[in-house]
Image (tube, helix red, strand yellow):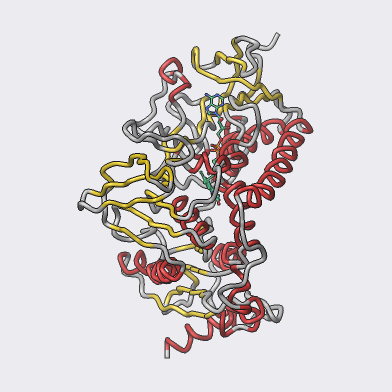
Amino acid sequence: MAEYDYDLLVIGSGPAGQRAAIQGAKLDKHVAIVERKAVVGGVCLNTGTIPSKTLREAVMHLSGYRERGIYGASYAVKQHITVDDLLFRADHVMRHEIDVTRHQLMRNQVELLYAEASFVDDHTLQINYVDGRGQRLVSAANIIIATGTRATQDGSTPFDGLTIFLSDDILHLDHLPRTLAVVGAGVIGLEYASMFAALGVRVTLIDKRTRLLPFVDGEIVDSLVYHLRQNRVTLRLGEEVKSLEPIHQEKGERVQIRLASGKKITAEKALYSIGRNGATRALNLHAAGIQADEKGYLKVNACYQTEVPHIYAVGDVVGFPSLASTSMEQGRLAACNAFKVEANSVPELFPYGIYSVPEISMVGRTEEELTRQDVPYEIGKANYREIARGQIIGDSTGLLKLIFHSESLELLGVHILGEGASELVHIGQAVMAYNGKIDYFINTVFNYPTLAECYKTAAFDGINRLG
Ligand SMILES: Cc1cc2nc3c(=O)[nH]c(=O)nc-3n(C[C@H](O)[C@H](O)[C@H](O)COP(=O)(O)OP(=O)(O)OC[C@H]3O[C@@H](n4cnc5c(N)ncnc54)[C@H](O)[C@@H]3O)c2cc1C
């Protein structure tokens, strides 16, 4: 008789939990995932990454946004876009991705327990089945916590999911508003603000910080701000929200937002997006000897171990960088560590994709960081409009910027704003991973006509700037 029911129990079936479980199974271990929702996939497949990126694609297609540079500002594939038009695409992609994930887990013989898990001790979980089949205890030699996050709510705001809603509610909107206030201009708030603006919704974006996306290169942020304003987004930065309350007007339900500066903003709907907290409340962590911080996040070491060595934590529940991509890799590495299989640590060089309109992507350091670190650098830029592919696709405002060491020419950062940014960035990432220099781009032949040619143009521009 084995000492435990499982070699590995994973709590949560988002990207981090899936990869942890599959890696454990590939090492021939007896693995189960406990998932408290009736579907697999976590925030990534059900409410966050995949729905939001598919909605964006539907917005970009139906609104004709991408083609307006060629056919004019009034061009649209569909005139009266409805919530159902947008959801049609999201629903299709989500169903497919959930099915693929479930199949992948089944193929690898990972048991799926649809239940909420909480610790009884450091090797035992109580699981409460979501279908009302009751509860039971399960034990494991190793446990990986991959419970992700929940959208932050404040107790005084009357959320109803329709007029005042969270990003998690987006798939349940009843109609597209004419006006929308977005409270919180982090990545999620910005993505949705620019998406709604591309649909013609009048958006007001409010944040208490005075600069958007502090980790993004300043020039790219300036460009984004220009585009937001072009799409009639009103930016209220450096403003603190005092209250949000529903009000009844002749035209229907509205939201009134009061700012500390005395301003009042009225909109048909408000998206509240001020951040996320670690989803650890239900876990009864103290029974396992673990503590979360005040925002629900868990602390781990470089091997993703919590303070209890056979209990690991991965993905959004450990905080930064809170991306699906890095969460997957953390899950895989934690399972390798649990079974003493050698594995590399998560590469420090990971790209960021921000699916605002226009799209932003970056890898490596920004000008601001390099200046703070006293690193001598130069930049090289290419505008999409200089590149034949930019003209063909009608993106005349895209920009690719290389940052490189002004003496060694080593590539230190790539920052892109425009169509395909989050794909293009991987070329720069690969060059940086091998400590490449910008002369690589000069001496390389790229397909023509492609956006990738921006790398060559930007490298020439950089060399010219060095004089
Ligand atoms: C609107 C939005 C857009 C995003 N866009 C992107 C993007 O474009 N690119 C990107 O890389 N990332 C994006 N992200 C972030 C990405 O979704 C997360 O990084 C990723 O989902 C984290 O994976 P995870 O496995 O850690 O957690 P999650 O995906 O949150 O999964 C956690 C799972 O654990 C389950 N769970 C929690 N507690 C328990 C319990 N006690 N018992 C059993 N099960 C439990 C939950 O039900 C959930 O299914 C976005 C997020 C949001 C909200």
Relative horizontal placement of residue 71, taking residue 383 as reference (left or right): right
Q: Which residue does the image show at 60% across and 49% down from the upper left?
A: 83
Q: Nearer the viewer, residue 376 or 49?
A: 49
**Residue 350 point in image, percent of width and height:** 53, 55
Ligand 1 positioned in quadrant? top right
Q: Which residue does the image show at 61% across and 70% down from the upper left?
A: 66
Q: Nearer the viewer, residue 313 or 129?
A: 129
Residue furthest to the front: 250
For the image, the number of numbered tags is 0
**Residue 70 point in image, percent of width and height:** 62, 79
Asked if 254 appears above or below 357 in the picture, the reply is above
Residue 433 visible here: yes
- Image quadrant holding the N terminus, namely top right
Residue furthest to the left: 261
**Residue 333 point in image, percent of width and height:** 58, 39
Q: Which residue does the image show at 50% across and 32% down from the upper left?
A: 313
Asked if 379 appears above or below 35 in the picture, the reply is below
Residue 330 visible here: no
Asked if 284 appears above or below 404 in the picture, the reply is above
Q: Nearer the viewer, residue 325 or 61?
A: 61
Q: Nearer the viewer, residue 9 or 72?
A: 72
Residue furthest to the right: 107
**Residue 443 point in image, percent of width and height:** 63, 83
- Image quadrant holding the C terminus, namely bottom left
Relative horizontal placement of residue 70, taking residue 366 as reference (left or right): right
